[in-house]
């Protein structure tokens, strides 16, 4: 284990592969089914291989050897049919479940042997099949192989996942998935000719892009920097816990199931009662809310400031 004085540490690489679009660690693409998540990923890969700009943004680093792990049926056929000219640069990796530690060790060894420089994982539901994705501790376990690859191979990863319904592209289930990603691309606009891509993270201004997106086309139709106009402020976990205690009724606070239903009615991108219950459990696990037993009323933790 290395310990380095902060004043002596220096970043070894450029933070952006494509500034405001693809970062050098984990970028998350989220959206409802059939909104173009895989299509966007392939457009990204095309630009990373060819060096051509994408969405009017310069590619700062090109890649010649890109790994792609898919979990859908016939995913290799889909990639081959959509990008026949890129197949010399793409390496198909057999899907590996998150619990298969030996399988992931073999993947890492093979990626290092082949000198792969970038990895696409399509998608989170396949990687984490059977896991309680609404629970934070389960989400962190599912993400462990991704963290292992980033740390050992030091290559960027593009992870594709589903969005919560009525959430404008926000990733479904535990907030840990978006919290773990360095950068996010949320796709919305199902059933329309155009899509909205919200590019968001902590290390650059949020940008909204209106695009034409399909397997053959990716064209920007307009953009706006959302930090320049009023928008709803993101609420962090302690703030949400305080909001719950201040606004939920005694009936809502009487147990986690009732409180989960109340949470699902708030404008937090949590559409299902079960997801609301899971969110309450996350707050309990994080020590931001408290209860004496599984059926006890929800109360304030002593360490949660008023």
Image (cartoon, grey):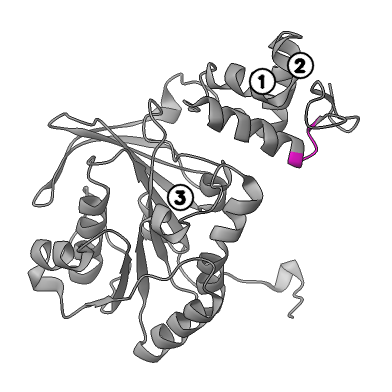
Tag 3, which secondary structure? strand
Find disc 3 in the rendering and name its residue. 183
Question: Marks 3 and 1: which is nearer the front?
Answer: 1
Q: Are marks 1 and 2 in contact (CB under 8 Å)?
A: yes
Residue 234 visible to the viewer = no
173, 184: nearer the viewer: 173
Local secondary structure at mark 2? helix
50 is higher (above) or lower (below) than 187 = below
Cα separation between marks 1 and 2: 7 Å
The kind of secondary structure element at disc 1 is helix
Q: Measuring 29% from the left and 74% from the top, which residue is drawn there?
A: 63
Task: Give the number of the disc on residue 254.
Answer: 2
Classify mark 1: residues with Cα within 10 Å, few (<14), some (14-19) or many (20+): many
Residue occupying the point 88% across, 33% down: 303
Going 61% across and 71% down the picture, which residue do you hit? 10
**Mark 2 Cα shell of 10 Å, populated few (<14), some (14-19), many (≥20):** some
Specify the segment rendered in magenta.
285-289
- The residues tagged by marks 3 and 1 sit, at their Cα atoms, a distance apart of 31 Å
Residue placed under numbered mark 1 in the picture = 259
């Amino acid at each position: 284990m290395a310990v380095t004085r902060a004043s002596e540490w220096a970043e070894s690489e450029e933070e952006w592969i494509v500034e405001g679009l693809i970062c050098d660690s984990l970028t998350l693409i989220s959206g409802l089914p059939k909104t173009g998540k895989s299509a966007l990923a392939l457009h990204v890969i095309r630009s990373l291989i060819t060096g051509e700009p994408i969405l009017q943004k310069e590619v700062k680093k090109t890649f010649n050897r890109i790994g792609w792990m898919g979990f859908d049926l016939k995913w290799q056929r889909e990639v081959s049919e959509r990008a026949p000219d890129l197949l010399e640069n793409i390496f198909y990796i057999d899907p590996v479940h998150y619990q298969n530690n030996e399988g992931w060790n073999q993947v890492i060894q093979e990626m290092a042997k082949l000198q792969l420089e970038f990895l696409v994982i399509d998608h989170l539901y396949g990687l984490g099949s059977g896991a309680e994705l609404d629970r934070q501790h389960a989400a962190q376990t599912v993400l462990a192989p991704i963290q292992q690859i980033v740390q050992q191979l030091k290559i960027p990863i593009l992870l594709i996942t589903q969005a919560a319904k009525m959430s404008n592209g926000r990733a479904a289930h535990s907030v840990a998935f978006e919290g773990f990603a360095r950068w996010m691309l949320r796709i919305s606009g199902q059933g329309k000719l155009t899509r909205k891509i919200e590019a968001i993270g902590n290390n650059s201004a949020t940008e909204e892009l209106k695009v034409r997106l399909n397997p053959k086309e990716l064209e920007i139709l307009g953009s706006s920097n959302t930090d320049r106009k009023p928008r709803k402020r993101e609420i962090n976990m302690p703030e949400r816990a305080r909001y719950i205690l201040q606004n939920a009724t005694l009936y809502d606070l009487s147990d986690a199931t009732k409180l989960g239903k109340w949470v699902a009615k708030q404008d937090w991108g949590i559409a299902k009662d079960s997801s609301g219950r899971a969110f309450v459990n996350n707050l309990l696990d994080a020590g931001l809310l408290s209860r004496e037993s599984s059926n006890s009323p929800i109360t304030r933790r002593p360490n949660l400031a008023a």
